[in-house]
Image (tube, coloured by chain):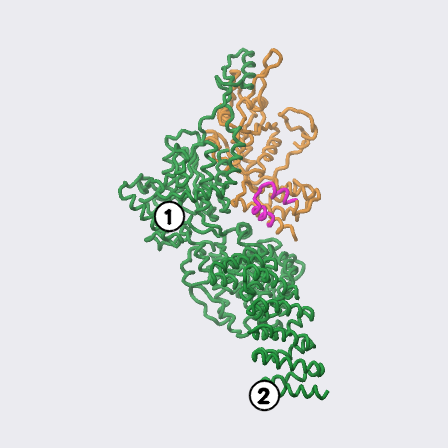
Amino acid sequence: MRTRNHTISDLLGELQDQSHAVHHEVEQTLPMIELHGADVTLAWLAACRTLFDFDREAGRAFIRGSAEAERISETVLPWTEQALEFMRWRGSWRALEGFMGNLPRAFGSLGHAGEKRWAEIGFAWCARQIDSGSAYFSTPVLELSGRQGISGVEQVSTPAEELFESRKLMLSTYLGGAIRVRNLLGAQAILPWALRGADILQSGRARGEAYFRLESEESLALLLEHLSGFRLVDRNRLLGMLLDVWYGGDFDVKESNWSPEKGRPFVETDGRSLYVPAVMSNRDEAILAVLHGAGHMRYGTFDRLAMKEMFAAANLEFPASGPVSWTPLFTRYGDDALRFQLIFDLCEDLRVDFRVQHEVPNYLHRLAVTARETGARHPESGPYFDLALSTVEGALRTVRAEGRADERFMPLLDPTATIADAYRVATDIYSQDTLPRVSDLEALHAAYLPGRGPNATRLAHPQEQDDQQQQTQAGAEQQSEQQEQGEEENATAQNAEAGNQQEGGKREEVAGYGESSGSATQSASKADNERGSRAGSDKGVPYPEWDYREARYKRNWSWVQEKRLAESNMAETNRLMKQYSNALKRLKKAIQSQKPTRMAPKLRQFDGDDMDLNAVVSYVAEKQAGRSPKADIYRRREMRQREIAVTLLADMSTSIMQHLPEGGGRLVDRVRAGVLLFAESMEEVGDSYSIAGFCSKYRDNVSYYNIKDFDEPLSQDVRSQIGGMSGRLATRMGAAIRHATARFEGIESRRRLLLILSDGRPEDYDDGGDRRYLHEDTRMAVKEAVSKGVHPFCITVDTMANQYLPQIFGQGHYLVLDHINSLPNKLPEIYFRLRR
Amino acid sequence: MKTAVNRIRGVERDIVQTPQAGDTAPYYEPQGNEIAIFEAAYKKRLPIMLKGPTGCGKTRFLEHMAFQLGRPLVTVSCHEDLTSSDLVGRFLLEGAETVWQDGPLTRAVKVGAICYLDEIVEARTDSTVVIHSLTDHRRRLTIEKKGQEIEAHEEFMLVISYNPGYQTVLKDLKPSTKQRFIAINFDFPAEEIERKIVFNEATGISAEIVHQLVAAGRKARLLKDHGLEEATSTRALVYAANMMIAGLDAVAACQVAMVNPITDDIELADALMEIVQAHFSA
C-alpha cells in the first residue's frame, strides 16, 4: 500500500516537474480516478506520464478528457489502455485528442462493446494512415453513427476501407461527405457516390475534393438524382395539370436551388413564381405544398392593399413600389423573432388553406391525415406542429359543419380575411405567450405541417387586386427587375426565361440579336451570315399583312426570303438517329401495319388482275334485272393517287434554344429529333411532304428555310440540315403561313395539310409590344390558307398556348404538347391521326 | 323506347320501330332550347345537324325527340367504307331473279321515319352526296340504280351528328353539305343538369355521391388541353355511378369508368386520379 502511494506521489511529482499546468489538471481529475482503487490510479497516472513523454499534446489531451470519460463510462482502465495504443503511431496526438473528446459520447451512445469496436475501427485507420485516423476520431460519434449505434459507424467505414485498398482514398477526404450522403440517401448510396468521387479525384484534385465536400455541381446532381421521395422536377407536368385543374390557370413554376444540405425542402413563393425543390419526402407532401403555395398566390398573401394594412398595423412603412422584404415584421421581436414568425405563418397558412379547401375538395382532410402520419418531428417545436394540426382539424370541423374551430382562429376562417387579419391574430397569440421559444433551424423547419413552409423566405412581390388571376404574365414580364435584385434564383430564372422573349414582351433587345439566351454569340454570328448572303439577293416575296386596328390589309408589307439552311450537322443527325432508333423502329412498324388498308386495291376498275367480288355480284344482279351495268368488275393493286400533301413548318426563333425545365438538353434537340422522325416515317408512308423552318426580324426580313421540298428525296444532305436546325430571331408566323400556303400551289393532292410546330406566340421585334397585332394577322393568314384548301394545324409546346391558339387556329385545330420530351415521338403520331 | 326494346329483346326486328302506346320516353334532360329548336325544325321538316363531343347526349336527345314526336328512328352509324348503296339499297340475287333491297335511308324516306346518320364525317364524301337532294326543298331521294326517284314521306326527317374534334381536321364536312342543316351545338351539360342526369341514369345512387362525381368530372374536363383526345363524358360519369351502385368502391369505379378508358398517358392518368381522390377520399 505504502509503496503504491509512494509511487503515485512520485509520479505526481514528476509530472509537476515537467509541467505545472499539467500537474494542476491531473490533480483536479485525480479524486475521481482514485475512487476506482489504487491500482487503477497508478495505471492511469502511468499512462498520463507515458503519453506526456510520448507527446506533450497527446498527454494533455488524455488528461483533459479523462474526467468526462470516467464520469460516463464509470471505468478507467479500458479507455486508458486504448489511449496507450496511440503510441504506436507517430504524430498521433491529434487522433488521440479526437479520441478523448469523443470518448464520453462513444460510451454514452454506443455502449461499452460499441465503444470498443469504434476504437478498433479507428486504430485500423490510424494504422493505415494517421491523418485518416485523426479524421475518424475527430468526427463526433453521433454524426459517425447517424444515431444508429455501432452499425452506423460501420456503414460509413466499410466502403472507405474498400476505397482505401483499391483507390487509396483517404478517410479524411471522404468522411464528411459520406456521412451527409448516408444521412440523406441511406448507407447503400455511399459506395457508388464515393466510387464516382474517386474517379473524379483521379482526374483532378481540386475538383475531386469539391465533390467530396458535396460542393460541386456533379456531386449535388448525383445526390438529387438518388434522393428518395417524390421528384417534383420530374413531375412538373403533373403539378402543372393539377394547378390548372384546381386554380384554372398557369402558374410560373421554377425549380428552387434547394439542396439536401439546406434541411427540409419547402415549396416557396414570392407572389410571382412558385419555387419547387427537386424532391420532397412524399407525394402527398409535394402536392399539398404546391397547392398551398399556389394558394398563397391566389388568395391574397401578396395582395398589395392587405400587405399595406399589415405593415401599418405593425407601424412599419410599406414601400410604394418594388419588392417588399418581410424582415421588418419579425426583427421587431428581436431574439424572439422565430417564435413570432412561426405563429404568423401558422395563422396565414390556416387562412390560405381554408380558402384552398373551397377549391380543392378534401384538401384540409388530406393535410390533416398527412400531418398525423408524420407526427411532430422535433421536441422543441412540437407544440407548434400540434397547434397547427389542431387548427386544421378545427377548420375541417367548420367545413363539415360539425363544430367550430378554436375561437382565436375563427376570424381567419372568414372568406374575406386577409393577411392583415392573420397578422392581428398572430400578435394576439404571441402575446398570450403559451408557445415555447425556438432557436434551432431544424426545429423551426419541423414546426411546419406537411406542405407548409416558411412564408417569408423570399422578397414579396405585392400583387394588385386583379393580378392575382394572372401571375403568369407577371412572372415573365418583370424579369429584368428580378435580375436587378440579385436574387439567389438568378441562374435558374435565366435558364427558364432564356429563350422566352416571346413571353417577355420586353423590347430592349430590339437592337441586338442576342436576347438573353445562352446561344447569343451563335445567333449573332448567324445573323451576320444571313446578312452576307442576303446582300446579293432581292427582297424576296411580298405578302400582305392584316392590321386589325385599321381592319385592312397592308399591301406588300411582309417580305419573305426563301433560302437554304446554311448549317448542317450530320453528327447530330446520326446521334439523334441512334438515340431514337427504337422509337423509329416502332413508328415504322406501326405504319407498316396500317399499310394494307391504305394500300387497299383500287376497287371497281375496268381492268385489273383480280375480280372485285362485290362488283361482280352487283354486275350480275343488275344484268339480270335488265339493266346494263358498267363492266367495272376488276380490282387492281396499285397506289392510289396521292391523297395528301403536307408541309411541316417549324418555328426556328430563338426561344427554341432554351434549356428544358426538366433538364436533358434544349428544346431544339427535341425539335430536330421530331422533324427527323417525321421525315423518316413520311418516307415509309409515301405521302408527299416538305419541311421548312422560319424566323423573322422585322417585317421585311422573314426567312423561310426550305429544308426539303415536296419532290426532293430525303437525302443525307436534307438529314444533316435537320441536324443543323437551330433557333434565331423572332416569330412572324402569318407571313410564314402565307408563304407555305403559296408553296402548295401546283402540288397535286386532294388534301393539303400545313403542320406548324411552334413554341410560343407569334411575335416580332417591330410589333410594338402589341401582341394582338400579329395574333390577328396570323389568324387572317390561317383563314386565307383554309380558303386556298390548305388546312393549318398547330402543334405547340407552349403550355400557355390555350390562351391564344384557339383564337388564331380555331378550336380543334391545334394541340398543346405539355410534355416536351414526347415531341419526337408524338409528331409523326399526330400526323397519322390527322390524316386518318 | 326502353320498353319497346324489352318487348323484343333478343329477337330480330325491323329497323323501323314506331313508338307504341305505353312505352316510356327515353330520359332526357334539356340543356337549353334544343327541344324547341328541334320541334320547330321538325314542323318545317328541315334537316338537323347535332354537333358536340362524344358522350354529351346527342343520340339520347334524338331518341327522346323521336319518341316525343311519335316517329320511328332509323340510325346508321357511318364508317369509312360506307358506300351510297349501303344507304340507298342494292340489287340482290335470289334464285334466278334479282331483288332490290332498300337501304336504311330509303326505308326511312318511305315510311316517314327520322333517319339519323351518326358521325357522318366518317363516311366517304361520295356517299354523303346522296343526301343532298333530301336536305333541300326537293325532299327527294334518287335511286340511281333503279332509275327512280322517291318523294320523301311527309313525316321524313334527316338528322346527322358530328363531333368537331381535331381528329377530323381533314375530314370536315363539305361546306355545301353543312349549310343545308339547322345546327344545334351540344356540350356537356351544366353542373346542375348533369347531376340530375347522373342521378336519373344510375338508379339508387345517393345525391351526395352524384354531387362529388359531377364535380370531379367537371374538373377532369379541364385537362382536355393537356393531351386528352376526348374529355370525360357525361356517359362516363353515368358508368362510374353505375359501377358504384354495383358495389365497387368509389375511387375504383371512377378509375375504371373515367380515367382508364380515356388515356394511356401515365402522367395524365395520375392527374385525373388526383382529382378523383380529392373528391372521394374523405
Q: Position of residue A228 (x, y in %)?
A: 59, 56
Q: Amino acid at mark 1?
A: Arg
Quick one: SS at disc 2? helix
The residue to which callout 1 is attached is A728
Instruction: Indicate the position of residue A242 as horizontal and vertical percent values.
Output: 55, 51
Q: Would you say B181 lies left or right of A706 here?
A: right
Distance in Å between CA atoms under marks 1 and 2: 84 Å
Q: Mark 2 highlights which residue?
A: A17
Helix, strand or loop under label 1: loop
Magenta-colored span: B253-274
Q: Chain of mark 2?
A: A
What secondary structure is the magenta-colored segment mainly? helix
Q: Chain of mark 1?
A: A
- Looking at this view, is A80 or A285 the one in front? A80
Percent position of residue B236, x then y: 61, 41
Quadrant of the image occupied by residue A671: top left
Q: For residue B259: magenta?
A: yes
Q: Amino acid at mark 2?
A: Asp
